[in-house]
Image (cartoon, grey):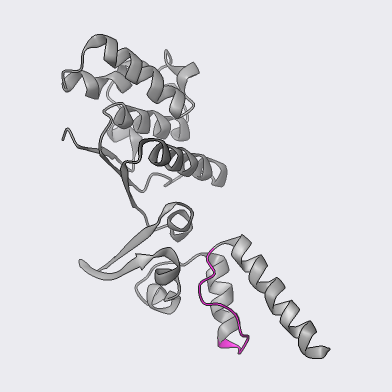
């Protein structure tokens, strides 16, 4: 418990105090961190998730996205070596999802800690992960880099996972005989692949 910090899917199951900064201080206090150090950790954690200006607010009066950021701040104030996030973007709009993922990525890069993201959103995984574990019926079905796993899109779909929409488009193009990559999982990659395909067609016409 001193090494691993977990952020629940629903922040309401994690927030325990009536004031934001008190909630973020809860875990360090239980770990016996000195008061001066707690103050520093709380301020740093709230600034890291962009919630410092809300430190004296009541969590129940804030939006779900802001409460999710409070929950993340409460865990990173523990300074865990391993951060586990269970569906951290569930119920958030696209802007809120991107914000949470950007915060998590920045935290990982700054602290060099291990981050485990549990998610059914293959878009989230593509944006954040360096390695992917795919579980199916309680068994390890795949393990590898994002390109290695996403190149097996048909298998992912058979397991009930929704691959990114752009991946599904390129899977269909490949089925129809177009010579496209089977490792497209971002819009930018899709654009580059279409430009490459168009360049090949123009070269063939010449």
Residue sitting at x 46%, y 44%: 101
Q: Quadrant of residue 136?
A: bottom left
- Please, is residue 132 above or below residue 194 in the view? above
Q: Position of residue 29 (x, y in %)?
A: 21, 18
Of residues 170 and 48, the one nearer the viewer is 48
Q: Position of residue 42 (x, y in %)?
A: 35, 19
Residue sitting at x 28%, y 30%: 79
Q: How many labels does the image show?
A: 0
Q: State left or right for residue 158 relative to residue 198.
A: left
Q: Is residue 5 magenta?
A: no
Q: Where is residue 126 in the image (x, y as percent from the top left)?
A: 47, 58
Q: Position of residue 88 (x, y in %)?
A: 38, 44
Q: Can residue 20 be seen in this view?
A: no
Q: Residue furthest right?
A: 206
Split into 4 quadrants, where in the image is the C terminus?
Answer: bottom right
Which region is colored magenta? 175-185
Of residues 171 and 184, the one nearer the viewer is 184
């Amino acid at each position: 418990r001193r090494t691993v910090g977990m952020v629940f899917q629903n922040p309401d199951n994690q927030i325990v105090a009536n004031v934001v900064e008190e909630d973020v201080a809860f875990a360090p206090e239980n770990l016996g961190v000195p008061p001066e150090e707690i103050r520093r950790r709380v301020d740093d954690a709230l600034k890291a998730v962009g919630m410092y200006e809300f430190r004296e607010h009541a969590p129940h009066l804030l939006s779900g996205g802001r409460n999710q950021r409070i929950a993340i701040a409460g865990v990173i104030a523990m300074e865990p070596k391993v951060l586990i996030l269970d569906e951290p973007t569930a119920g958030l709009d696209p802007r809120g999802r991107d914000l949470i993922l950007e915060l998590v990525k920045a935290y990982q890069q700054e602290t060099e800690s291990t981050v485990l993201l549990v998610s059914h959103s293959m878009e989230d995984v593509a944006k954040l992960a360096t390695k992917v574990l795919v579980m199916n019926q309680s068994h390890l079905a795949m393990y590898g880099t994002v390109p290695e796993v996403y190149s097996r899109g048909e298998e992912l779909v058979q397991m009930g996972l929704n691959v990114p929409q752009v991946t599904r488009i390129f899977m269909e193009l490949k089925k129809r005989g177009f010579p496209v990559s089977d490792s497209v999982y971002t819009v930018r990659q899709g654009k580059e692949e279409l430009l490459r395909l168009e360049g090949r067609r123009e070269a063939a016409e010449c």
